[in-house]
Image (spheres, helix red, strand yellow):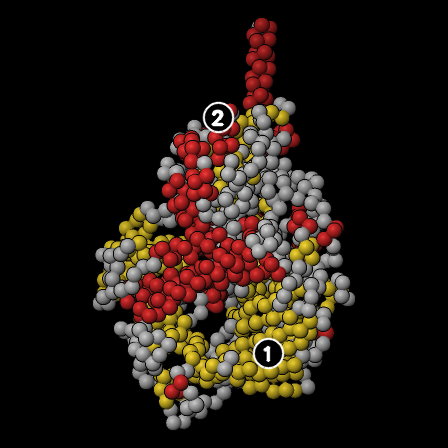
Amino acid sequence: MMRKLCLLFIISVCHCGIQKARAQEAFYIDGYHGGVWGHYPDWNTRYMVETLKKNPDWKINIELEPETWDRAMAVDPAAYAEFKAMFADQSLNGRIEYINPAYAQSYMYNISGESIIRQLSYGMKMIKAHFPEAVFTTYSSEEPCFTSALPQILKSFGFKYASLKNPNTCFGGYTSPHGGGLVNWIGPDGTSIIASPRYNVERLSPKSTWQTIAWDNSAEYIQGALADGITHPVGMTLQDAGWKNGPFIGNGRHGAVKSTYTTWRNYFANIAKGDLARDWKVSQEDINVSLVWGSQVTQQIAQKVRVSENKLVTTEKLMAIAKVYGNGDWPKTDLDSAWRTLLLSQHHDCWIVPYNGKPGNTWADKVTGWTNHTNKICDSLVLRAENILSPGIEKGDFITVYNTTAVDRNEAVAVSLPDKYIGINTVVIDAAGNEMLSETVSSNGVKKIVFKAKVPPIGYQVYQLKQRTLHLVQASYSIKLTNEGYKIETDLYRILLDTLHGGIIKSLIAKKLNNKEFVDQTNARSFNELRGNFYDNGGFRSSADSAVSVEVLQNGPVCFKLAIKGKIAGNDFTQIITLVQGRQRIDVNLKIDWKNNLRIGDGSKPGDYKIDQPAKPFYDDRNKLLAMFPLNLKHQKVYKNAPFDVTESKLKNTFFTRWDSIKNNVILNWVDVTGNNDEYGMALFTDHTTSYAHGTDFPLALDIQYSGMGLWGRNYTINGPTEIQYALIPHAGKWDKAGIWAEGTKWNESLIAVLSNRHPQGISRSLVNVPVGYEVTTINFNGKDMLVRLFNTGNVTTEKITFNCNASSVSLIQLDGSTSGKLVLYKKPGKIYTIVHIPKFGIRTIKLENVNKF
């Protein structure tokens, strides 16, 4: 008996020892990040090949810009061929995995959802051209290149796994920690993907502003993970291409911890395949990211990217209309070229190190060149589409108005008047002879007629100029100067401007929303006030500190436009406010003519910068120059859009001052603040990705300007005028009921009006009709097949999608081009339709084969 007990004791001890030994085993993701645009020396391919040969247990995960391989093949074809041969094994035992095929390694959260799709599709296509065996299994990035909607995008491209870690390059942020070794990362539409989170024990490194403790698989990190119940802990660093470390953690030993190099694919499918994955619905506020928001260089990069994004999707949809109804050729080569330079301008380095590079060739300079290229192609293609559909453009009496959004529009457009109509009474009529509300204005010496146009979705409507012997229309606006300031009244609003205090809006009443007053008149701050800390010029200064002049630029009946001219800290500013009859949106164009580089922020000097100091001056928006909007809304909620998502904020406020406490205060397109259980709200739109401010004791505000110390101690300066466009929409109900996403799309994709000497076939055309709440993000052609991408911002319902064209069949396809299911095609005279089910925030691509007009 004693012998049995001793034997049992020995077995038990041995068993515990085995368990302990196994418990100290960990796994490590090594590899390379960079590329020909970021950093990739010509010797790097040969170095990877030789280092892999010398270290047979080493495996690498690569995040290299796809264009890198064109140069690698040219400068060292032998090394390229050897690397290609090594890469060919894409099994679990393979030693190389491509983990981020994005064309230009964008941050993702700062660009449109359609841009994210193109980053991956163009990148994967180019990688496949070099490495036909490539299998894209896991998405992972060295930078915080994350956004909440990635699961459905990745799964549609064929990815099985993802990582939410970026342990060695957290300068721009990191994700929230989460318990467990694996999670089911659930996106806003309900799609999930197995992912490795930043563990709860994966603390941000002390004396660092760029790492978590998972960067080198230290004993502290691994033992903490094991103690937290994580069976197969994994750490990660993707080395910069150009580093000559070889295996980053050497033989993988840290005391009692032995780390094994692995690919992500092998880790998920083999090592951790039996591990528990907890559900985690990742919010956009779990993506804790920050850049030098408000700095002029970042602001201008974001504006240029936004302009090109808007132009390119508008161009694609307009070319699709021209192909179907005008039998035009599909300009694939031109569109590919335009997308290439737009995608490059979304490279993360453009945004986080804009000043890097030689004078005239910095990342910021590259963005200017890249977006100019995209814009030039788009402008040329729009002109081509107009010529196909409306021959003899810029001549004649007919006006064709194009709408590339998925909603009916009734908005103001303008065209230059032909010489024969100058100096006479001119009106615009529709096909039935009805006179449209219009007015004649002068703009930079050019006479234009502005009129309200009703245009169907993804289509056009034709109007005609006519002479009238008498054309008198009563203005629908009134403006009066009183002791309180200017009182403006439109069909929708009553607005009071305080001219003695910066032209701030003292009152904004929405007449058709029960005369709701939207301005909080008890707040210490004022509505549409500019305020910031000019720390070398007297501290906090406000536009409300001085009086302004007001000039009425346009007074209806279609549009009302006025210019407010004042000073902020001694610098001239102009705010042009535009209101349109029947339109909820209030547009503001702000221009500040800076005399010199004034410092705006918290008062730190560039010389104060320490790379390992968590406190950074550009984090705190309270000190930046802000446009402020105190709202008369109780119990406020904040909703903000993101790529293919809208998040209800859980933040008490958006403020932070340290790297180790970053919050997601990003405004992509819009932020919407509601009150009293979503009874009323105010949406704020911006022409570029930046930051917003809000708190329980701080009004909604938009970041206008920062000037001072940035990342790596760089001095972010003011080098000229600042010009920003923003807009406001007072509304009733929650953002989705109020159609705020569609309003943002309308703002981004303006109506296009063209004069021609004859109208297209058909007075009115609408290529695609979708339910309320659906967006058409793009329309593309592959040969004779038309691809229509839909995004559902509304309710989860089964809906009818109508196409005013002919097709032989219709199906749903994945983003990788594979068919996910056939759809029933119904035909009616002059149109076809199909039925689809798309969850809220879901995206679907419909393929129509052999498309032509009826």
Image quadrant in which you'd find residue 770: bottom left
Image-quadrant location for residue 318: bottom left
The one nearer the camera, 190 or 590, is 590
Front one among 2 and 593: 593
Viewer-proximal residue, 166 or 483?
A: 166
Q: CA distance from mark 2 to mark 1?
A: 69 Å
**Relative to residue 213, is residue 84 drawn left or right?**
left
Q: Using the image, determine if residue 489 lies above or below residue 391.
A: below
- What element does badge 1 sit on? strand
Sequence-wise, the earlier of marks 2 and 1 is 2
Where residue 829 appears, as percent x and y from the top left, is 22, 67
Amino acid tagged 2: Lys
The relative height of residue 517 versus residue 419 in the rendered view (above or below) is: above
Mark 2 or 1: in front is 2
Q: Which residue is mark 2?
A: 53
- Residue at left offset 62%, top offset 81%: 550
Q: Quadrant of the N terminus?
A: top right
Kindly identify the amino acid type of the residue bearing the numbered disc 1: Ala
Q: Residue at x 63, y 59 (%)?
A: 295
- Could you tell me residue 71's position as x and y percent? 45, 42
| Residue, disc 1 | 563
Few, some or many C-alpha atoms within 10 Å of disc 2 (few <14, some 14-19, many ≥20)?
A: few
On the image, the x and y values in percent for residue 116 come to 46, 52
Give the left or right position of residue 420, taking residue 575 as reference.
left
Q: Looking at the image, is 271 positioned above or below residue 743?
A: above
